[in-house]
């Protein structure tokens, strides 16, 4: 079976992983991993805010609304989805407790086995919180709220749609969509802020989009044109270049995932306020580094090295207790940083230099954890 989205089909291909993952695991995690907070419903991307607190995107618990027969659906056995407004954004208080910041976001639950899509990732741009929604749209049982970039008021919990990504992916199809493995509303998975724009990776179609705070959406690169259906999931930025990690297809083949270096055709990054020609704005795949497995997040650490979060680096289908964080050393060696994680789904470095990871990200509601990793 090929891969539909970064998490939902990872779980779907794992013969019911989401429905059998318990709230605790007996997996032996490395000694540098500690539970920071718990009780999350499908924790995904996470970022620290200007207030120093950790904000967490949650997939939610889905719902019972069906749109079967009303629009194009995700094919069985994963589809059709049913939807509801149960996804949330939370934060971890100074006391280490989960606190809801905003709620009412679209969440979708797959047909079989049950897994959830909701709020995928978060980013702060000019002090404001933005979120990428992956559980919206008619194909996910949420016809009134599309997959979108939304702006969130962290003080009141109010939020508004900035850009309709469901409409954009339909109007700008990928060059090589995987017809047997297709999400009509797309599945944005990762979100970062760089200069005056937000950047999100759409994992199913294989595209990288940028979005302004005013809602202008631009396709920066169609990764499928160069790489085919590799399921790009994650993005980081360094010196104007972007680094995109891919999940790959299941059953997983160890060491088959890679981190792509994506650069502009022009050598320097355009300065703010300038409007270069469209050709100079285009991004291209400038290189890649293989040797990774099932990447779901990439980030640069305080040491300047790139880190990758691997969902399940074992051969076959996702396995509990084998997820890990690795880093690419200066000599080209890939080394383990933390091991024994269970279906981890997102990571971010904190202002304290520690690495924070969403653990049990594809698991039963309430089983999700945030763990803190001390970097050796």
Image (cartoon, rainbow, N blue to C red):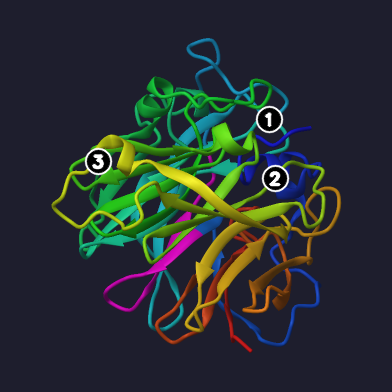
Position of 273 relative to 136 (above/below): below
Question: Which contiguous range is marked in magenta?
Answer: 45-62
As rendered, which of 290 and 25 lies closer to the eye?
290
Magenta stretch encompasses residue 59:
yes
Which of the image's four quarters has the N terminus? top right
Q: Secondary structure at mark 3?
A: strand
Q: Quadrant of residue 219?
A: top left
Q: Earlier in the sequence, mark 2 or mark 3?
A: 3
At x 26%, y 59%, the residue is: 195
Position in image of residue 193 (x %, y %): 33, 58
- Residue that badge 3 annotates: 162
Q: Residue furthest right?
A: 315
Position in image of residue 151 (x %, y %): 25, 50
Task: Bin the neighbour count of mark 3 within 10 Å (Cα to Cα): few under 14, some 14-19, many 20 and up.
Answer: many
As rendered, which of 356 and 247 lies closer to the eye?
247
At x 62%, y 42%, the residue is: 231
- Residue that badge 1 annotates: 78
Q: Earlier in the sequence, mark 1 or mark 3?
A: 1
Q: Earlier in the sequence, mark 1 or mark 2?
A: 1
Instruction: State left or right for residue 71 relative to residue 146.
Output: right
Position of 353 relative to 261 (above/below): below
């Amino acid at each position: 079976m090929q891969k539909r989205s970064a998490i939902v089909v990872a779980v779907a291909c794992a013969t019911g992983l989401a429905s059998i993952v318990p709230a605790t695991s007996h997996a032996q995690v490395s000694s540098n991993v500690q539970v920071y907070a718990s009780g999350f419903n499908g924790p995904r991307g996470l970022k620290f805010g200007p207030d120093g607190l950790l904000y967490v995107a949650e997939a939610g618990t889905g719902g019972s609304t069906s749109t079967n027969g009303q629009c194009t659906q995700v094919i069985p056995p994963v589809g059709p989805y049913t939807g509801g407004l149960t996804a949330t954004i939370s934060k971890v208080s100074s006391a280490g407790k989960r606190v809801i910041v905003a709620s009412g976001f679209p969440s979708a639950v797959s047909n079989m086995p049950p897994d959830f899509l909701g709020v995928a990732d978060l980013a702060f741009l000019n002090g404001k919180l933005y979120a990428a929604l992956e559980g919206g749209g008619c194909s996910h049982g949420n016809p009134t709220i599309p997959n979108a970039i939304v702006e969130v008021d962290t003080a009141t919990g109010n939020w508004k749609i900035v850009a309709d990504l469901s409409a954009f992916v339909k109007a700008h199809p990928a060059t090589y969509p995987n017809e047997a493995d297709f999400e009509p509303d797309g599945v944005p998975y990762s979100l970062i802020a760089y200069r005056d724009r937000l950047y999100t990776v759409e994992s199913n179609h294989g595209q990288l989009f940028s979005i302004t705070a005013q809602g202008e959406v631009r396709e920066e690169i169609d990764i499928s044109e160069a790489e085919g259906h590799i399921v790009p999931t994650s993005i980081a930025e360094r010196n104007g270049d972007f680094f995109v990690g891919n999940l790959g297809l299941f059953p997983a083949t160890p060491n088959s995932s890679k981190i792509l270096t994506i650069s502009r055709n022009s050598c320097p990054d355009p300065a703010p306020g300038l409007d270069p020609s469209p050709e100079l704005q285009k991004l291209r795949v400038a290189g890649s580094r293989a040797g990774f497995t099932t990447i779901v997040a990439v980030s640069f650490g305080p040491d300047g090295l790139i880190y990758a979060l691997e969902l399940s680096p074992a051969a076959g289908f996702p396995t509990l207790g084998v997820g890990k964080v690795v880093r690419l050393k200066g000599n080209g060696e890939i080394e383990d940083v933390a091991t024994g994680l269970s279906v981890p789904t997102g990571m971010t470095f904190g202002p304290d230099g520690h690495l924070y990871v969403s653990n049990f990200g594809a698991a039963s509601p309430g089983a999700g954890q945030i763990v803190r990793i001390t970097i050796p």
